[in-house]
Image: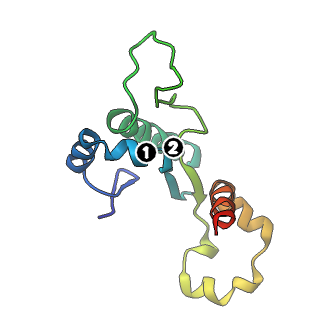
Amino acid sequence: MVFPAKGLCFFHDTRNVISDKLSGVVREIRERLQLVGAMIPETNAEKYFQGLRERAWDTFAEELYDDVPAGKIVAEEDWSFDQTDESAPHFPWPVRWHRSFAALKSLHDRLADRDGDQVRAIFGPLVDGILPIVRTQGDKS
């Protein structure tokens, strides 16, 4: 089940995450997770993004990341990230809200008119994150 909570989307509720964490399922999938911040607003975008990142880090730190005691240097076997680490799975790949992409019917009618620079400005980080995955999957087939 997917449901939004304070700008985050979860694939199941916290009780399931905790039981999955205890059963070891989280260890198997957590390295394949990546948060996507969809529809980042045009106004106050930086403030919105910062709040989303902070809430995501809180959730990931509580439910997915390994506990690293204060003062301990993070070892290679520890799976934990700093809140501002752009390579971390809690650090959202932003997709900016844009009026011309908001309505599916109008989007469908105007796909041929899309400017590559405009698409890059709106979807750039998401595309940059997905391309290596798609290329890797393509190499396996």
Figure quadrant of residue 104: bottom right
Residue 43 in sight: no
Residues under numbered marks 2 and 1 in contact, where contact means CB atoms less than 8 Å apart: yes
Residue 89, label in figure: 2
Where disc 1 sits, the SS reads helix
Q: Amino acid at mark 2?
A: Pro
Where disc 2 sits, the SS reads loop
Circle 1 Cα neighbour tier, 10 Å, few/some/many (<14 / 14–19 / ≥20): some
**Where does residue 6 sit, x and y in percent of width and height?**
35, 50
**Where does residue 45 sit, x and y in percent of width and height?**
57, 49
In this picture, is 48 found above or below 71? below
Residue 30, label in figure: 1
Q: Amino acid at mark 1?
A: Arg
**Where does residue 35 sit, x and y in percent of width and height?**
49, 51
Q: Residue at x 59, y 59 (%)?
A: 95
> Along the line of sight, which residue is nearer the eye, 94 or 86?
86
Discs 2/1, front: 1
Residue at the extreme bottom of the image, as rendered: 109
> Along the line of sight, which residue is nearer the eye, 64 or 35?
64
Q: Residue at x 32, y 38 (%)?
A: 63
Quadrant location, the C terminus: bottom right
In this picture, is 112 found above or below 91? below
Left or right? Give the position of 85 relative to 138.
left
Q: CA distance from mark 2 to mark 1?
A: 8 Å
Residue 98, label in figure: none
